Amino acid sequence: MALIDIKVPQLSESVAEATLLTWKKKPGEAVAQDEILIEIETDKVVLEVPAPVAGVMAQIVKNDGASVTSDEVIAKIDTEAAAQTSPLVVSPVVAATPAAQPAPAAPSHAAVAMPAAAKIMAEQDVHPADVAGTGRGGRITKGDALQAAAAPKPQAAPVPTAKPPTAAGMPSLTIPALQPVDADLDLAAYTDRPEQRVPMSRLRARIAERLLQSQATNAILTTFNEVNMKPVMDLRNLYKDKFEKQHGVKLGFMSFFVRAAVHALRKFPLLNASIDGNDVVYHGYFDIGIAVGSPRGLVVPILRNADQMSFANIEKAIADFGAKARDGKLTLEELTGGTFSISNGGVFGSMLSTPIINPPQSAILGIHATKDRPVVEDGQIVIRPMNYLAMSYDHRLIDGREAVLGLVAMKEALEDPARLLLDL
C-alpha cells in the first residue's frame, strides 16, 4: 500500500482557516490524476483541490464542513489499491423464483432536495434517488422534481415505501451542512411556516464583518448627481458592431464609467487615497474594484492599472470577472487591493442607493439604472436617458468640495466622451 496525503493548499497570510465543502469521492472509489476531489471555501475565494496522483480514495480524514488550515492533511489516496466494486451475490437456491429474490437495497445517499422540490416529490411519490439534481452542489430543484413527476413511470410491481412522517402535511426540509441556500427558493413551499437554519458561509461572514467595519470606522457621506447618458449611448450605438468585430467583445457601459472614474481620480487624488493610522497614503496608480454579484455573495475583483487599459481590455476583463465569479474561479490575487470601487446596481434595476465604502479605500461610485426622464435643456422640457450617480466618501479624509467636484468631473466626462480621449 502506497498512501499519498491530500493536503489543504497554501492559504494567503490574511486567511487563517477555510471550510471544506462537499467531497466528490468516497473511500474505495477510483480517483484519476488531477480530478477535483473537493472545494475549499475561504472568506474570499473557493479553492479546488485536485488529486496529485491516480489511485483509490483510501481515507477521508476531514469530513464535509470541517475547518482546516494550510497544509493540513484532509484525505489519503492509495496508488496501488483497486477500486471497490459491488460483488455479485449468488443465491444457493437452484431454482429461485423472481419473488424469492431479495429486493434491491435502498440507496444509502439521496440527493439533497430544495423545499419546493421535496414537496412535489412527496406528493407525486417520486424518490429523490430517481431524480438527477441540476442545482448547485447536485441539489434537486423544483424544475427537476416537476420533470421527474411528469416522466412516465415503468410498469413494475409496486413496492410499499414508508413515507417520512410530516407535521400537519408540512413538507420536510433537508438542508445540507454548511452549504449556502440557493437565492431562488420557491416561497410556495412555505405554506406552513417552516424555518431553515444554515451556517453562514465564510464569504458572507467576511462581507458582514467588512461592512460593519466600514460603517464603524469611516465617516461615510454620499453626494449625488445626474448624468445624461445620451452622448455615451449614441457613441456606443455608432461603433458597437465594429467594436465587437474588431475586439471580440461587446462594447458595454462599464468601460465608460471606469474611464470616467479614472479621469476624476487624476484630477482629485484624495479620492484615490487611503488612511493608514495617522498617515494619508496617496496612490500613484489606479486599481479599480468592480463589484460583482455571485452565487456565493458579493465579490470585488480588481482592474489593475485601469488608466493604462483600453476600452476593449476593460470590457474583456469585466466579462472575465463575471464568468469567474459565477463559477467560483476568482483568485485571491484578483480580489486583493484596489484604490477605488464601482458598484453597478443598475443592472438589477436600482434607481438610487448609497454604496458602502470598501475599506481601506476612501470612496466608491454607485451607478444606477438609466431611465428616460423629463429634463430641461435651453428652457425646453425634453426626454433624455438619465442616470443617477452616487459617490460615498470618507469625510475624515475627503471634504465635500473634492467629492462634489470629483463626481461633477465624472458627469462631464460621460456627457462629453471626447474628454476621455483628450484628457480634459
Image (tube, helix red, strand yellow):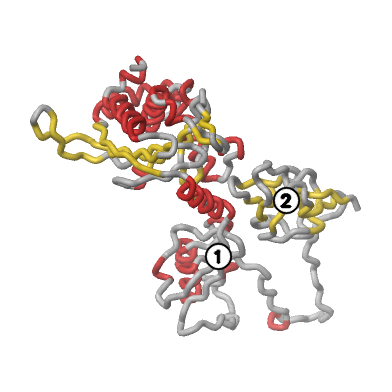
The structure residue drawn at horizontal position 41% and vertical position 29%, both measured from the top left corner, is 258
User: CA–CA distance between discs 2 and 1?
Assistant: 22 Å
Q: Residues within 10 Å of mark 1 (few under 14, many from 20)?
A: few
Disc 2 is placed on an element classified as loop
In the displayed structure image, the side of residue 203 where residue 258 appears, left or right: left
Where, by quadrant of the figure, is residue 222 drawn?
A: top left
Residue at the far right in the pictured view = 1
Residue kind at label 1, given as amino acid type: Val
Residue at the far top in the pictured view = 422
Residue 111, position as x, y percentages in the image? 59, 65
Where, by quadrant of the figure, is residue 129 drawn?
A: bottom right
Residue to which mark 1 is pinned: 198
Label number found at residue 421: none
Q: Residues within 10 Å of mark 2 (few under 14, many from 20)?
A: some
Residue kind at label 2, given as amino acid type: Thr
Disc 1 is placed on an element classified as loop
Residue to which mark 2 is pinned: 69
The structure residue drawn at horizontal position 24% and vertical position 41%, both measured from the top left corner, is 371
Q: 109 or 300, which is in the foreground?
A: 300
Residue 292, position as x, y percentages in the image? 46, 42
In the displayed structure image, the side of residue 407 where residue 288 appears, left or right: right
Residue at the far left in the pictured view = 379
The structure residue drawn at horizontal position 51% and vertical position 82%, both measured from the top left corner, is 166
In the displayed structure image, the side of residue 3 where residue 96 appears, left or right: left
Which of disc 1 and disc 2 is earlier in sequence?
Answer: 2
Residue 367, position as x, y percentages in the image? 35, 39
Residue 280, position as x, y percentages in the image? 51, 31
